[in-house]
């Protein structure tokens, strides 16, 4: 059954069609609203899908009162992700907030090129990074980073796949990405002659119009394994897609691992790309790899946390303890000033790590009831209050709610599970690792010390952790400028064993569920 409701804007009411049972947020996304907006996929936490009922509003939900406040709820504001379409609603939409910007100074096109150009793209669940380069000498002509335009369909893989499997959903998501690729290709002033597209297995299957059932339902599996050139249409050159190593270990991992191996690292090493998934590869020796993936959700991308924001101008990506107290470090470096407009995932982890170190948070993730052991800790502890019935730490223009800490604990448990699963499968002690390489945009900003303090990684790894940059994008560029490297990537599926993390493991600390046992701010082997 199809319903309709109306969006009222200065041009008058616009009718929006919706399928039976569909939420307002999903119907609005289908209609062209919320494109590129980092929504929290129906968790009722980010607040970016707020709408105001001009028709009589439904009674407010507790999540709406908490996120929007009593005054806004009384004025008719509600969260579209929590509201099924009833039919004939008249709504006003709020601005979703600034869309995360492309990195500053990254869009300046170099001098016109006479040779052939290639376009390398890393398509993540949340972000989209790209590089336009000369195929003759590998020189970068232009590059940038923005958001995946599909974000309005949900901030993590499961919700994105669920949307893609609805009638017309996959076609819409594919079109949104192709629209971006066409715009990027146009930056060259002419059609690039080559394209490489790397990303996780779900994103690759959606944009390449491949079967999704094996990724969306257990038992999970790959019906398409990449490692080939795919025709995308729209005037784009055929895209080389690196091989997919497993249902949730995708072409971004094979591209990144190829780029890292080309640098001749010491073995054994760990490659960790933390985003909406924790994708990790334990490299035991050349041609011998173990890989694992655990769903993290969008929290590390700054999506779904109360003051969460993707890294961009004005967003806190780190915190420091100064004689004056806690100070946020804003994206953009020392020249960035002013009150923070949000907190990115790395900033949240650093804030939680400081509070954990100072005794404000206990190991279970609760705000400590006993006095902190140091004067500084007690000063920070005095900033814990209650807001809308929930404990919250507020300082330096930033807030950390108890429910945000719970989300971070879930992310920590999943990451810890992946790390412990790989080391356990290899029978390898932490001390044997030569290095840990932190890949991706999150890895470029996160504090390795914070990861260790909170128990994401075992003790002793922070000093051996290295920022590796966007290895997926580096690998995609390498496949364009040195096509012979594709053979290295295409050998990886036969050299890589996927370590399952679902079944409970014998001897897990705390017994029972290996995930629940790791929901503490301490590493659990």
Image (tube, grey):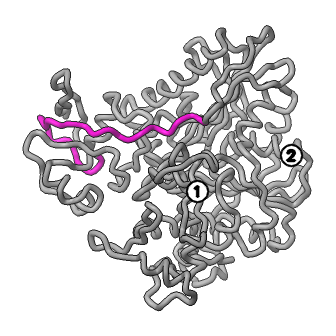
Q: As rendered, which of 22 and 356 lies closer to the eye?
A: 356
Give coordinates of residue 252: x percent, y percent: 68, 41
Residue 129's place in the image compared with 368, above or below, is above
- Judge whether residue 314 can be spotted in this image: yes
Total numbered labels placed on residues in the image: 2
Can residue 295 be seen?
no
> Which numbered disc covers residue 269?
none
- Residue position marked by numbered label 1 in the rendering: 329
Main SS, magenta region, reads: loop
Which of the pair 279/206 is nearer the observer?
Answer: 279
Where is 457 relative to 308, above or below?
Answer: below
Q: Secondary structure at mark 1?
A: strand
User: Residue at the location (43% across, 88% down)?
Assistant: 369
Q: Is residue 394 left or right of residue 442?
A: left
Tag 2 secondary structure: helix
Q: Is residue 394 above or below residue 226?
A: below
Q: Would residue 207 appear left or right of 95 to someone viewing this image?
A: right
| Residue 80 within the magenta-colored segment of the rendering | no
User: Which residue in the protein does label 2 denote?
Assistant: 261
Displayed quadrant of residue 49: top left
* Other-residue count near label 1 (Cα within 10 Å), few / some / many at <14 / 14–19 / ≥20: many
Which residue appears at 19% of the width and 25% of the height? 10
Cα–Cα gap, marks 1 and 2 = 33 Å
Question: Who comes first in sequence, dot 1 or dot 2?
Answer: 2
Q: Residue at x 29, y 35 (%)?
A: 27
Magenta-drawn segment? 81-103
């Amino acid at each position: 059954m199809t319903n309709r409701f109306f969006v009222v804007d200065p041009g008058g009411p616009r009718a929006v069609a919706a399928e039976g049972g569909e939420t307002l947020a999903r119907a609005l996304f289908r209609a062209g609203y919320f494109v590129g907006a980092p929504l929290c996929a129906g968790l009722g936490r980010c607040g970016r899908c707020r709408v105001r009922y001009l028709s009589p509003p439904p009674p407010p939900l507790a999540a709406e009162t908490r996120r929007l406040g009593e005054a806004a709820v009384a004025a008719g504001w509600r969260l579209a992700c929590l509201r099924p379409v009833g039919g004939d609603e008249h709504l006003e939409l709020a601005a979703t907030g600034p869309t995360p910007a492309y990195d500053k100074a990254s869009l300046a096109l170099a001098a016109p090129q006479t040779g052939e150009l290639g376009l390398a793209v890393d398509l993540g669940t949340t972000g989209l990074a790209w590089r336009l380069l000369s195929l003759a000498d590998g020189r970068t002509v232009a590059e940038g980073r923005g958001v995946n335009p599909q974000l309005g369909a949900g901030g993590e893989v499961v919700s994105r796949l669920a949307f893609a499997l609805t009638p017309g959903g996959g076609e819409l998501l594919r079109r949104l990405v192709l629209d971006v690729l066409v715009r990027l290709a146009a930056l060259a002033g002419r059609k690039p002659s080559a394209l490489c597209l790397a990303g996780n297995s779900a994103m690759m299957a959606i944009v390449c119009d491949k079967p999704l059932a094996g990724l969306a339902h257990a038992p999970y599996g790959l019906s398409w394994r990449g490692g080939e050139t795919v025709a995308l249409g729209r005037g784009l050159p055929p895209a080389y897609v690196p091989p997919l190593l497993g249902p949730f270990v995708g072409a971004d991992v094979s591209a990144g691992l190829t780029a890292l191996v080309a640098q001749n690292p010491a073995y054994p090493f760990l490659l960790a790309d933390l985003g909406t998934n924790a994708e990790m590869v334990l490299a035991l020796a050349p041609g011998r790899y173990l890989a694992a993936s655990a769903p993290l959700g969008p929290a590390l991308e700054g999506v779904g946390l109360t003051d969460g924001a993707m890294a961009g101008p004005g967003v806190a990506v780190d915190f420091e303890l100064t004689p004056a107290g806690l100070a946020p470090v804003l994206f953009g470096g020392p020249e960035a000033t002013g009150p923070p407009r949000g907190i990115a995932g790395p900033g949240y982890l650093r804030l939680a790590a400081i509070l954990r170190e100072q005794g404000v948070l206990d190991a279970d993730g609760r705000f400590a009831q006993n006095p902190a052991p140091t004067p500084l800790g007690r000063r920070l502890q005095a900033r814990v209050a209650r807001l809308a019935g929930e404990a919250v730490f507020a300082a330096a223009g930033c807030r950390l709610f108890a429910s945000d800490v719970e989300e971070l604990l879930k992310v920590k448990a999943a990451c810890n599970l992946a790390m412990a699963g790989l080391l356990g499968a290899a029978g390898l002690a932490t001390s044997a690792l030569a290095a840990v390489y932190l890949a991706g945009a999150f890895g470029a900003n996160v504090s390795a010390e914070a990861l260790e303090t909170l128990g994401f990684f075992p003790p002793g790894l922070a000093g051996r952790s290295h920022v590796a940059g966007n290895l997926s994008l580096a690998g995609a560029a390498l496949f364009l400028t040195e096509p012979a490297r594709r053979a290295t990537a295409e050998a990886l599926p036969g050299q890589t064993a996927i370590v399952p993390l679902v079944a409970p493991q014998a001897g897990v600390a705390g017994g029972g569920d290996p995930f629940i046992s790791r929901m503490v701010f301490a590493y659990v082997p």
